Image (cartoon, rainbow, N blue to C red):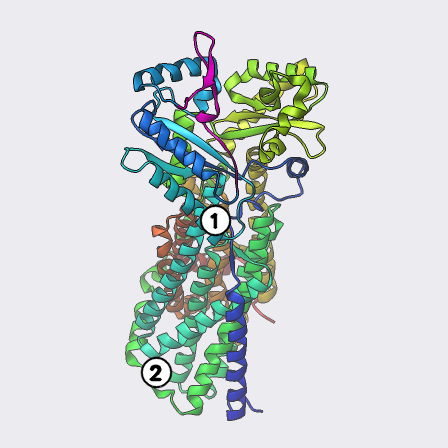
Amino acid sequence: MPIGSRRFLVFAWALTICLSAIMAISVTRLAFNDGLSTAFESDTETFRAFQNFSERFNSDGAEILVLFHTDDFAHPQKNTAVETFITEAQFIENVSAVLSPFSFQYTSPEGVEDFLFPYQRPAQSEMAQRLSHAQAQNPRLGTLISPDRQHLLVVISLTSYPETGPDQQVLLAQLNELATASTADLGINAALSGYPVLRTETVRLLFQEFIWLNVFGAVMGLTLAVLTLGNLGLGIITTLSSGLALLWAAGAMVFLGFQINVITVALPALILILSFAEAIHLVLEIRQQIADGRANPIHRAVRRIFPAAGLAAITTGIALGSLMLSPSALIYQLGFAGLFATLISTITIFTIVPLVFLTLGYFNRLSWVNTDAGLRMQRRFGLGGLIKIAQVAPVKTCASGLVIFATSLCIYAQLPYSYSLYEGLKPNAEPVATLRTIETQLSPIGTIKFEHPIEPIDQLKQATIALRGEFGAQNILGLYDVIEDDPLNWRQTLAALPLPLSQQLISHDATSTVITLVHPYQNSGATAAYLGEITPRIASMPQLAALGPPTGALVLSSLTSREMLSAFARCFLFAVLISGVLISWWLRNAIIGICVMIPNVLPITVVGSVMVFLDYGLSFSSGVALTIAFGIAIDDTVHVLNRLRIQAKETPHMAPHMILNAVRQTAPALMISSLILVMGLLGNFVSEMPPLAIFGGLSIGVFIMALLSDVLFLPALLICLTQILPAKFLRIGK
């Protein structure tokens, strides 16, 4: 069955349609997850301690915080409206218990005990005095209602938080609607927050951003393909092949267990944009071969481009695959899926584009491909002025590049680490803003957990009293708060509590309890510093000898995030090393292979230096962006070197004119592919998720620097090597 025959084309298109249908079905199973549950999974002592703690105690992560705000909750109608909300909220499915100021008892100055909010509400002025007196009696009341009585917090404990997004949305919608209905026309505002709300909002935005980024990338890719190729038909061919590359890659990723989260949401759109750039490289070469009147132009174009494109896909895959060195399960999954997706997309491009042109050739429809408008447009992207600088002043250009590289590398090494549990959402997003209001008006919501034996009870009492004295009674929560009036009968007291609350206080085997230290959370760095401060203080107190080490989600994220962020350095160095080895092997020249890595590392160090000056730290999103951007940036260098290899078949020793010819021949494609990468990522800047904006900004910065480096620094460096090295060290290829 000869390639290009009717039987071959029918079989190839039938196989393409069947495979696309399978992948389309697979993509419908693509799951969206905030990723927080797996972000810190690792083989570290901190994670193992957290895992052991989580297996022994029920999590308090299934709590929804409802913050009410008005001018004064001493007003009878207003506090009654909130109480109505609380009463009806307990009938919603999955709601197990509610904690609020209405749960508190009150002892009057005369010694009379009653509910804090009695059935017969007193006048506003009397209720205000009652609340002030109650807060003086019990400082913990201040964590639920502010001293000025303008903020009131209701904590809703859930039996379990729904697993699926639609069910989560239903639950939150029910609470929102109930809060609105209960407080209508009373001047009361209600806002939902807490860990479940943050996760649900993140997942909602992930789906929205996933659609937006891919649609924006496809539109920009099609527009730029038509403009740069000067032909609508070629633009459609490019878009078709790139779309199938995304479909096949995404479908394969689903089979590999890939999920969309705050780290991976940009990957599919990035694969799409890369596919556009690769497809345009191939289409440009096919058109050039047709314009030159070559025999078998499609086959010849593939043979000339595929070695470079294949190596470029491998180096990009290596950059993504290097993320598998991260101790974070989340980053590992990104690296694993990205490695395969990159290779699959390249295979797709070099399957579909030739197949389309073979089909057109079968019907004798290739004459329209060679258009004057397209060739004129292509020549406009030659970047001749920049290449001229490298030609006229190679030594100065090379020296300048080396100085910039050395300086930026020193600055880049000072890049600090930065991570926050809230970085997936904007600071003004309602759930985040509500949390900040709770922390400023009521109480910190960050929690540091300590395990302590329940018995002997006197030991638990002494530990609780010691912690209260050290950190403030209002900042220490635990079992002893509940059983303080009758500690010897603690089992009966616990039995009277709602089951989810009691299970949060004691271990499953009923031998240990949790003592919680509330802590104002800013970011992981601040929390890690705080832990370093309090740990020696706790260790020096004999009453706390039985107290376990600090743990909990806040501790886990704060202590492991630094280790995981530092792992990006290992990932990056691995990508640079392996890419250098591969290029050296491909060129059959280790010296040139190592030297050409400098212009490719330069964009990373320059962008990293800018981050230092702008006081941006290395976060998960920026670490991923810089590592992946390096793998993509090196693609341009590979295409330049591929032209050198082609010329080396006639002249095996690298010479200045060969270097300049290689850069001139590839400059239009480099400019076009860089333009597509930059324009395709512009959609990230309007994202509602800060990590996506950071990813887009850093990647664009690297791509622009990489283009400048490849047409200025790279040729100047190679020309200088021809002037320094003996001829035997300049040989390329076999």
Q: Which residue is nearer to you in this view: 339 or 385?
A: 339
Residue plotted at (44% across, 50% down): 170
Query: Which residue carries the number 2 mark?
Result: 370
**Residue type pointed to by label 2:** Asn
Q: Inspect the magenta stretch and tell me whether residue 725 lies in it.
A: no
Q: Which residue is nearer to you in this view: 362 or 267?
A: 267
Q: Is residue 430 left or right of residue 345?
A: left
Residue 632: give x, y in percent of width and height.
48, 59
Residue 402: give x, y in percent of width and height.
46, 48
Q: Is residue 644 visible?
A: no
Q: Earlier in the sequence, mark 1 or mark 2?
A: 1
Q: Inspect the magenta stretch and tell me whether residue 97 lies in it.
A: yes
Q: Which mark is residue 671?
A: none
Query: Which residue carries the number 1 mark?
Result: 168
Q: Which residue is nearer to you in this view: 470 or 244?
A: 470
Residue 608: give x, y in percent of width and height.
45, 44
| Residue bounds of the magenta highlight | 95-119
